[in-house]
């Protein structure tokens, strides 16, 4: 199957416009950004090597266009070192919302990985402590935690498109389909109840 920009526009323009609209208040600016995104897509579509990576590629172009929009609107101000290290409230909120879902995803993993991740990621034990608690060798515990993290990452990537900052912290996420949107909306409500 060969991709063309018309089909990509038909399939993705509404979703990308919604993403942009959630980040940019002015509808005219959001429409301009969407046009810029699809101009870039039209010019670079032939460089996409794996068609199964189309959606993540489009979201990446869109995020960069939104970033460029905000860079152009305000003067650059150098932050004090302490402020630069403090995560923004939006970043914290996105991470909190995902944390609720991650506990559920960990609970859905096979028992050995569920147990290892619960101990390391939720209870805060070191991998050495996990090895002792589960009566495993240290390398066995490390392996179990790494496999569990891989399975968790796969589940998360299948559910949501995740945006990370340069330090690898979650700053935003977009549910991939209607079922995930409903699930994430429910999690958002649960998070707000606990705050």
Image: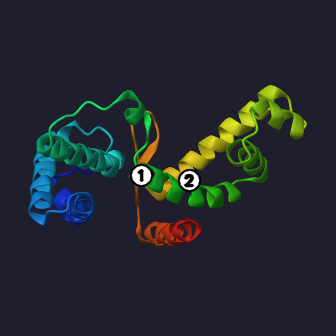
Horizontal side of 80 relative to 167 (left or right) equals left
Sequence-first disc among 2 and 1: 1
Residue 34 x, y percent position in the rendering: 15, 56
Residue under pointer 1: 89
Horizontal side of 1 relative to 151 (left or right) equals left
Mark 2 or mark 1, whichever is nearer to me: 1
Q: Circle 2: is it few (<14), some (14-19), or many (20+) Cα within 10 Å?
A: some
Viewer-proximal residue, 114 or 100?
Answer: 100
Could you give the CA–CA distance between mark 2 and mark 1, rounded to whole angstroms? 26 Å
Residue 92 x, y percent position in the rendering: 47, 51
| Figure check: 104 above or below 84 | below
Which quarter shows the C terminus? bottom right
Residue 77 x, y percent position in the rendering: 22, 34
Q: Mark 2 falls on what kind of element?
A: helix
Horizontal side of 128 relative to 120 (left or right) equals right
| Figure check: 43 above or below 55 | above
Q: Circle 1: is it few (<14), some (14-19), or many (20+) Cα within 10 Å?
A: few
What residue is drawn where x is 19% and y is 64%?
Answer: 10
What residue is drawn where x is 51% and y is 59%?
Answer: 97
The colour scheme is: rainbow
| Figure check: 149 above or below 136 | below
Residue under pointer 2: 155
Query: Toward which corner of the image does residue 167 lie, by quadrant?
Result: top left
Query: Toward which corner of the image does residue 190 lie, by quadrant?
Result: bottom right
């Amino acid at each position: 199957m060969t991709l063309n920009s018309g089909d990509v526009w038909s399939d993705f323009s509404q979703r990308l416009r919604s993403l942009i609209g959630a980040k940019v208040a002015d509808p005219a600016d959001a429409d301009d950004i969407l046009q810029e995104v699809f101009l870039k897509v039209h010019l670079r579509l032939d460089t996409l090597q794996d068609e199964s990576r189309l959606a993540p590629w489009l979201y990446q172009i869109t995020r960069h266009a939104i970033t460029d929009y905000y860079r152009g609107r305000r003067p650059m101000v150098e932050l004090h070192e302490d402020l630069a290290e403090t995560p923004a409230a939006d970043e914290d909120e996105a991470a909190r919302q995902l944390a609720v879902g991650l506990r559920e995803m960990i609970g859905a993993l096979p028992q050995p990985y569920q147990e290892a991740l619960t101990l390391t990621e939720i209870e805060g034990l070191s991998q050495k402590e996990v090895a002792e608690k589960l009566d495993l060798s240290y390398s066995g515990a490390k392996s179990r935690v790494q496999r569990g993290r891989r399975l968790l990452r796969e589940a998360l990537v299948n559910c949501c498109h995740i945006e990370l900052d340069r330090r690898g912290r979650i700053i935003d996420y977009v549910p991939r389909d209607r079922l995930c949107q409903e699930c994430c909306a429910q999690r958002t409500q649960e998070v707000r109840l606990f705050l």
